[in-house]
Amino acid sequence: QVQLVESGGGSVQVGGSLTLSCVVSIVSTDNHAYNCIGWFRAVPGKEQEREGVALIDSKNSPTYADSVKGRFTISRDNAKSTVYLQMDSLKPEDTAVYYCAEDPYPCYGGAGLRRTFNYWGQGTRVTVSS
């Protein structure tokens, strides 16, 4: 069983910053040693249309969507079982519900942003206003 709990969402003005956190709890007989953890987002009301934002693999190698490259930073603290998404220079189009997801397989770079992950959190809402 894998549980993911996001926090850190909120309202911020254009150009502001937020840091999202995702605590990952893994109790499984499957091998998650080479897992991939990612952040995805969906416009409120369109939760089925999730966009891959950033991924991080077991070696802390990140992958970013073009829309957030240079503004968002993903990191993971294995000792705390937590993955972070630092979001800077926020824009109105970043407004969304942000979801954390985990897959027991490697990220495989940009292709991972478009694949379906096995385990998902409940999401945390981010609103960017002008």
Image (spheres, rainbow, N blue to C red):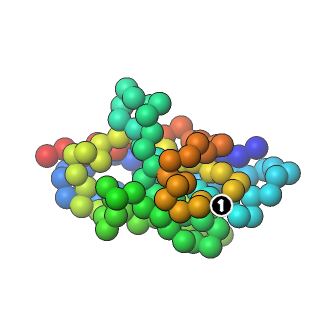
- Which residue occupies the foreground of this view, 10 or 91? 91
Horizontal arrangement in the rendering, residue 84 relative to residue 128 (left or right): right
Left or right of 60: which side holds 40? Answer: left
Quadrant, the N terminus = top right
* 93 versus 16 height, above or below: above
Residue lying furthest front in this view?
A: 111
Q: How crowded is mark 1: few (under 14 residues within 10 Å), some or many (20 or more)?
A: some
Q: Which residue lies furthest to the right in this view?
A: 29
Foreground: 16 or 41? 41
Residue 120: give x, y in percent of width and height.
59, 42
Q: Is residue 21 left or right of residue 25?
A: left
Classify residue 98 as left or right of residue 126: right
Residue 50: quarter of image: top left
Visible residue check, residue 7: no
Residue extending farthest left: 130
Q: Position of residue 55 (x, y in %)?
A: 51, 59
Residue placed at 61% from the left, 45% from the top? 117
Measuring 57% from the left and 72% from the top, which residue is drawn there?
Answer: 60
- Answer yes or no: is residue 102 visible: yes
Measured along the vertical axis of the image, is residue 89 above or below residue 99?
below
Q: Which residue is pictured at 31% across the width and 55% down the height?
A: 67
What is the x, y in percent for residue 54?
46, 58
**Residue picked out by circle 1:** 106
Helix, strand or loop for disc 1: loop
